[in-house]
Each structure stands twice: as C-alpha cells, then as structure tokens.
Image (cartoon, helix red, strand yellow):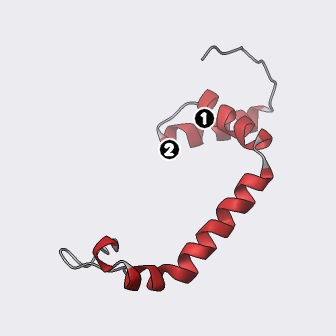
Amino acid sequence: MSSKPVTIRVPEELHAQLQERAEAEGTTVTALITEAARNAVRDPRLESAADLFRQFVAQNADAFDAAFPDDAPAGPDAADSPGRAA
C-alpha cells in the first residue's frame, strides 16, 4: 500500500503529549496520528454492530457452552477443563 505525506501543525504541548504516549506504547507519533485518522473515517455502523455482537455473545455464552461443551473456551483458571471463566 502506498502512502502520502500529510503535514499538520499542532501546539507544542500536544506534540509533547503525543511523543510521551508514543514512547509509552512503543510506537511513533506518526502511527498514533494515523490510527486516529483511521478512527475518524471508520463507519460508525461497524462499531455499533461490533457492540451488538459482543452483547449477544456475553448474553448467550452459557447457552453456547452448554450446547457445545467440547468447544467452550478454557478460562484462565481452568488449565484442562472446558468452560468459560466467570
């Protein structure tokens, strides 16, 4: 994928905050700003759909685990036993 340079001006304080966050996350200021730009143009319907899916899974996890016990994810406290962590 090709890329285009974009130049923006930000206040010094904001730039310092971006640098601190980038260092804390082990990334770059460019990567932080690129991700912010992606989020700015993301279709809000996708986030809404993802939230609905997460709610559905959370509300129906026990039913899925009961119906498919061999496929239930192991919880962090259950080394070898099937089931979902509480």
- Marks 1 and 2 sit apart, C-alpha to C-alpha, by 9 Å
Labelled disc at residue 33: none
In the displayed structure, does residue 48 sit left or right of residue 27? right
Q: What secondary structure is found at the residue carrying circle 1?
A: helix
Mark 1: give few (<14), some (14-19) or many (20+) Cα within 10 Å.
some
Mark 2: give few (<14), some (14-19) or many (20+) Cα within 10 Å.
few
> Is residue 5 shown above or below 23?
above
> Is residue 5 shown above or below 53?
above
Q: What secondary structure is found at the residue carrying circle 2?
A: helix
- Residue at the disc numbered 2: 24
For the C terminus, the quadrant is bottom left
For the N terminus, the quadrant is top right
Query: Which residue is depicted at the point 62% across and 67% down?
Result: 53
Rendering coords of residue 79 (x, y %)? 19, 74
Labelled disc at residue 19: 1
Query: Which residue is depicted at the point 62% across and 74% down?
Result: 55
In the displayed structure, does residue 78 sit left or right of residue 17? left
Rendering coords of residue 43 (x, y %)? 78, 46
- Mark 1–mark 2 CB contact (< 8 Å): no
> Is residue 51 shown above or below 40?
below
Q: Amino acid at mark 2?
A: Ala
Rendering coords of residue 13 (x, y %)? 74, 38
Of the pair 68 and 3, the residue shown nearer to us: 68
Query: Which residue is depicted at the point 46% across and 38% down?
Result: 26
* First reached walking from the N terminus: tag 1 or tag 2: 1
Q: Quadrant of residue 58?
A: bottom right
Say if residue 59 shows up in the picture.
Answer: yes
Q: Amino acid at mark 1?
A: Gln
Say if residue 86 shows up in the picture.
Answer: no
Query: Which residue is depicted at the point 28% across and 75% down?
Result: 70
**Residue at the front extreme of this rendering:** 67
